[in-house]
Amino acid sequence: MPPTELSVAGITVVQSMGNDPLLPVAVRRPVAPGQGSMTDAIAAWANATESSFRADNAPSEQAPAELNVGWQVITASGPVLGIRMETFEFGGASGQTTHRVFYGDGSTTWTGMDLVTTAGRAEVAALVRSAVRASGHATLDPDEVGAAGVDALLTDLTFSAAGDLVLLLDQGTVAPFSAGNLTVTVPQATAEPLLSERGRRVADAVRSGLPYAVSVPTSAAPTPVAPATPVAPAPVPPASPAVAPPPAAAVDCAKLKCVALTFDDGPGSLTGTLLDRLEAAGVVATFFVLGQNVRIHPDLVTRMVRSGMVVGNHTWDHRDMKRLSLDEARSEVDRTSAEIARVTGVSTTLLRPPYGSMSPQTATLGQAIILWDVDTEDWKNRDASITTSRALATVRPGSIILMHDIHASTIEAVPAIIAGLKARGFTLVTVPQLLGNPQPGKVYTRR
Ligand code: NI
């Protein structure tokens, strides 16, 4: 998918991520202020998607199944917000990417199906079939299209600025897998009579080009609603001036008992608290960030650099790198490095592949691969005392400890982990301090 450049201020993200290479799961969904109904509908859909994936797929060493759900803003105009959820699912033999749109106007939420009248749906199916027929698609029988029901044709319904209706038809759902994803455009004049009242509202909002404005209830008082605040769709924010990291302390890890704390998958809503705790303890750590989270929380990433933390790359989408083409893998890494550099002015060549999963190709991306030798399994236990005891149980001089700054229990565990390490005489350092000068193409699990 092309980069998501349309972003809306105030949207936060909920991440459900495992770190199990035998069953890689990463589900990311938006929480949009003032769009409670839509946020709830997306949450219910995302939870159901993850549950059914987990019910259908067991962890496997031979051919791990993978679920990766991401999102993008497709419309933000007037009161209408449109979100496209994109799901990559690998079932052990082949992968498939599918899409589903949600629209909200503050009080209610709609899917693509709701935007077309009941009578219009059959008409849309007929239009799609004739478009497929006209395209002369080699492997696609037009009569098969939509055979499973018209809903499948309307999961990704969007409007162009000119009011044309655009349907994205997912590979393997409405068309044979080999056909790939198809796009069918219905011109505005043809589409207009097929739209429901909700469909017209969405089309009008897109055409209006108005700034996005939705009423955001204040959290203190649930009943009264604050006046509508215009929230302009935020273009990619300008790069902040380069942040000057403080000079790293000279530490000789050949002589000292060094250990590196590392945090993956952020930055997120809890990262600020974690930084408070690290700073209060006078401790540095290394953060392997997701590029899209850097886009959302640039302030936290600049703060990391200012406080002497090191920022490394954890890819843009948290896909299992084993399953990516060379171009895809390069894009995941380079896009994230570029975002880190844009925000902080600092470049990184430290990569932690999601799930610790990599192929020989991963080592060719110009990055030092930083794994770990102490796994707290914080993502699984979600318990501060278990996370703490796992961090301290097998640590030795030169260790790299794996944690994730998206779990409250992890943030809670950090002060005790720091105190425990210090009590045993460890010096807490960043990954570059620990390893000296990590080399691109090399894989490190410890010093
Ligand atoms: Ni991760």
Image (cartoon, rainbow, N blue to C red):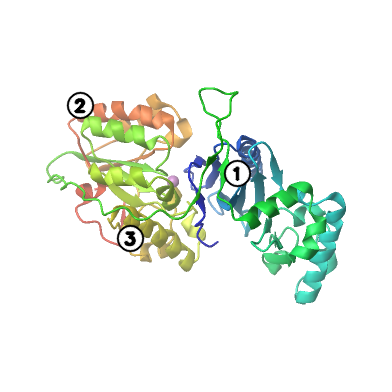
Q: Counting other residues with Cα less than 10 Å from the Cα at mark 2, is it few (<14), some (14-19), or many (20 or more)? A: few
Q: Residue 58 carries which label?
A: 1
Task: Give the mark toward the camera: 2 or 3.
Answer: 3
Classify mark 3: helix, strand or loop: loop
Q: Earlier in the sequence, mark 3 or mark 1?
A: 1
Using the numbered discs, state the Cα–Cα distance from disc 2 to disc 3 in whole angstroms: 34 Å
Residue 338 appears at what percent x and percent y? 36, 60
| Amino acid found under the numbered disc labelled 1 | Ala
Question: In the picture shown, does residue 7 fall above or below 169?
Answer: above
Towards the viewer: 223 or 400:
223
Residue that numbered label 3 is attached to: 367
State whether label 2 is within 8 Å of ligand 1. Answer: no
Viewer-proximal residue among 296 and 142 = 296
Which label lies toward us, 3 or 1? Answer: 3
Nearer to us: label 1 or label 2: 2
**Residue 221, picture quadrant:** top right
User: What's under tag 2, amino acid-wise?
Assistant: Ala
Per the model, the C-alpha gap separating discs 1 and 2 is 41 Å
Element carrying mark 2: helix
